[in-house]
Image (cartoon, grey):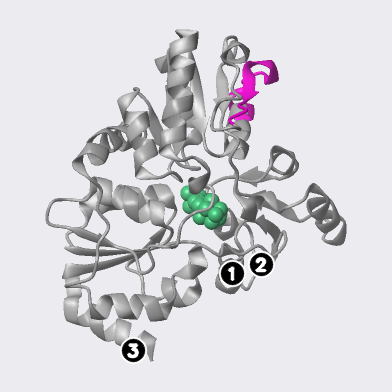
Amino acid sequence: MYSKIITDLREKYGKRLAILGHHYQSDEIIAHTDLAGDSLELARQIDKLEAEYIVFCGVHFMAESAAIVRKDNQKIYIPDAKAGCVMANMAPADLVDKVLTKILNESGRKIIPLAYVNTPAAVKTVCGKHGGSVCTSANAVKMMKWALDQGDGVLFLPDKNLAFNTADKLGIPEEKRLLLDIRKNGENLDVSETLDKQLLVWPGLCAIHQRFKLSQIENLRIQHPGCKVVVHPECPPALVQAADGDGSTSYLIKYVSESPAGSTIVVGTETNLVYRLAQLFPDKKIIPLSVSFCSSMAKITEKKLAELLQNIETADFEDVSDEIREPAKVALERMLKVCA
Ligand code: 13P
Ligand code: SF4
């Protein structure tokens, strides 16, 4: 029933409407999208779209990022504004600003903030104002290298796993990294400990990827000799090191699609995507590292999408104030330029 409503309304609005979906959305949502992608691909598409109504099926920071870069005649919608990424909520903008200001003032060093795209718009604003930028899992290596070249060190937030996995790829020595203690609203932070560090890391994580265990990789390698293992870089470093490859959701899809028929591939990421890959590639054996659904992504349902489309002309849309938008846009555009 909801499927028919959505199909009819897509037909009614035609090119005036675009539905975008992140790879972690359920199959029933993906079936209604004009474009499915990883965070970077979706962010890149917004200003190329002609549609005036853009519906973002994903988590809130993705719709908010789209609202930052949208054109004046475009409106961005999300079927459930409460679909908030738990990791993004681990770095509230006022705390990020407080911690960064304390480091800058007390150290006198030029520390460049680099925010994973999984952050609220106001955090991107802080990055834009302080010469920093944004990255996704698809370009974290390039962006961390860029940020290191801009100053004396980098504050990476909020995902500690992506930070350390990226630092491993860039060969940043362990003794040059520091996991920040931001407890007691930032009061615990001892800036003297940061002085000789290249990489300051916010202690955030994604519970969906943190759940995976090294022992699961070891057991699956015993059960499926010769299998390949690929994981998302939000997984802890021990798992990334034990895997045959790691990368964004699009990387994982590409890895599976390019593997020869008959391959067995263990995939460590959100389960909707892994099950979809198993369906898309029946000539390969695709095994989830373990079952781990993102409950935030799952808040977007066909029912909510149908209801939004039925009221799209009067529905609330995502917007950010100019004060937030302008510096946040600077941060996002720096990324798009560095990774053009
Ligand atoms: P990608 O950028 O790889 O699509 O990942 C986004 C995300 O939220 C992963 O948990
Ligand atoms: Fe956020 Fe993790 Fe869900 Fe990705 S999988 S949207 S990082 S909670």
Q: Quadrant of residue 333?
A: top left
- Residue 131 seen in the current view: yes
Q: Nearer the viewer, residue 121 or 252?
A: 121
Image spot of residue 173 (x, y percent): 66, 18
The quarter of the image holding the N terminus is: bottom left
Q: Which mark is residue 284?
A: 2
Q: Secondary structure at mark 2?
A: loop
> Is label 1 or label 3 in front?
3
- Queried on whether the Cβ of the residue with tag 1 lies below 8 angstroms from ligand 1, the answer reads no
* Above or below, 38 relative to 288: above
| Mark 3 / mark 2, whichever is N-terminal | 3
Residue span colored magenta? 168-182
Q: Quadrant of residue 36?
A: bottom left
Q: Which mark is residue 4?
A: 3
Identify the amino acid type marked 2: Lys
Q: What whole-number distance in Å separates the C-alpha atoms at marks 1 and 3? A: 27 Å
Q: Secondary structure at mark 1?
A: loop
Q: For mark 1, what is the residue?
A: 281
Q: Are marks 2 and 1 in contact (CB under 8 Å)?
A: yes
Label 3 Cα crowd, 10 Å radius (few <14 / some 14-19 / many 20+): few
Q: What whole-number distance in Å separates the C-alpha atoms at marks 3 and 2? A: 32 Å
Identify the amino acid type marked 1: Phe
Let me know if residue 129 is in the magenta part.
Answer: no
Identify the amino acid type marked 3: Lys
> Is label 3 or label 2 in front?
3
User: Is 40 left or right of 226, judged from the image as shown?
Assistant: left
